Amino acid sequence: MSYEWIAILMFSSMMLMLMTGQRVFGAIGFVGCAAGLLLWGVGGVDIPFSAAMKLMKWYPLLTLPMFIFMGYVLSESRIADDLYKMFHVWMGPVRGGLAIGTIGLMVLISAMNGLSVAGMAIGATIALPELLRRGYDKIMVTGVIQAGSSLGILVPPSVVLVLYAMIARQPVGQLWLAGVIPGLMMAGLFILYIYVRCRFQPELGPVLPKEERQIPMSEKLRLLRAGMLPIGIFASMMIPFVNGWTSLVESSAIGAIVAFLAAVLKGRMTKKVFENTVRNTLGISCMFMWIILAALGFGAIFDGLGAVKAIENLFTEQLGLSPWMILILMQLSFIVMGTFLDDTAMLVIVAPLYVPLVGAMGFDLIWYGVLYTITTQIAYMTPPFGYNLFLMRAMAPPEIGLRDIYRSIVPFVAVMALALAIVMIFPQIALWLPDTVYGK
């Protein structure tokens, strides 16, 4: 059997196991190890083992539990609630202002946590009831929360970009900086859409009643100060890192410690909050570790077959596709896979194939990391099985049905597709900031 057919058999076997409901790391790791044994005998086990040991020696891996801990501290201690109160007061007089404020809330939550699940949980439990109570259109606000929460995997410190950095062997700091401008651009496009639509259809996002807007300036400033605390935590972590005063791991530790101290000083670090934070941090960190280990083992076997070169030859020589056509097909495949897989599973399944191929075609792997992340955001919200769709269904009140959730994401998916096209056409949107900071 040729190596090309072996690679196809490995890939199809893994997809089949995933469709039967097996755990992601189990399906990927089993296929990789079984292929190694069958191809090279007992010595084949050394290939995935060697890849796993490289991961264990990768010092920046320590950032993963640090950022997850920081996010859960701010979430479980309800410090993030202060952010919404701040946006509520300052944005209420604008048509659609609370929905716009919710996008701002999601950006800041993303900058504290790096996971879309946290943004979805906070948005669905804090923002959604308030928006519905004040007469906002349920379909629009459901889309707002789903779209806003997806920013968690693009705005630094994105955990997904950390995983991409591990698999693609790219600097985490450059990937984070590459996600800043595209992430803010996408948030700005969301805000522009909400503002324009509410200008033409005021009933979708009414302004706050006059009595709720008549708040003393002293109270507004107090809420502003309370809401600025999470921003200060993020700044305490990112400013030393960007200026080169601390390493990535040291910055992540600073963020975790400052967030913990902030919760203690505000009297919100109870025993229950601490236990929930540690338990969730351990669970999420271990899940990511197992998946990364399995992915690296599978990727080592895949590389050993020369499968990447074979597939590159198939696309470029036999089919005659241009590099841009291949890139677009890759992005479309992410959207298809996103209908039944989460972002981590998508990355570890196709990274052994896509990342070397992208590099061989002459594209920048930092830029491609941003493209992958934006496409994953779109896949999160693509029916019938988009990840965010089911998270919203689980958290939404009874009056919001699955049909409403599906309808709500249509305009926001269109905005995301526009953002993806802009970043593809103008790569410097993603590359300017890391090139400037790192002096390339």
Image (spheres, rainbow, N blue to C red):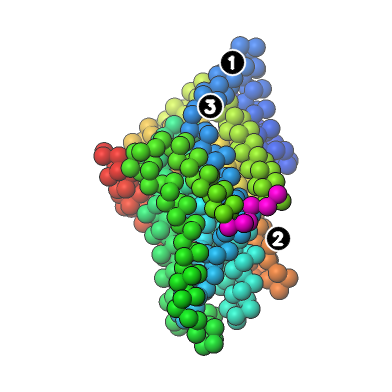
| Residue picked out by circle 1 | 46
Q: Residue at x 55, y 19 (%)?
A: 50
| Residue picked out by circle 3 | 55
Horizontal side, residue 98 vs residue 322: left or right? right
Report the mark closest to the observer, 2 or 3. Answer: 3
| Residue picked out by circle 2 | 394
Provide the secondary structure element on which disc 3 rests.
Answer: helix
Choose between 154 and 273: the one closer to the eye.
Answer: 273
Q: Earlier in the sequence, mark 2 or mark 1?
A: 1
Q: Residue at x 26, y 38 (%)?
A: 440
Horizontal and vertical percent for residue 60?
48, 33
The N terminus lies in quadrant: top right
- Give the residues drawn in magenta, as a range: 266-271
Horizontal and vertical percent for residue 400?
68, 71
Residue 270 highlighted magenta (yes or no): yes
How many marks overall?
3
Q: Main secondary structure of the magenta part?
A: loop
- Rendered image quadrant of residue 383: bottom right
Badge 1, how many Cα within 10 Å: few under 14, some, many 20+?
A: some
Real-space Cα distance between discs 2 and 3?
35 Å
Q: Which amino acid type is marked by label 3?
A: Leu
Real-space Cα distance between discs 1 and 3?
14 Å
Q: Is residue 429 visible?
A: yes
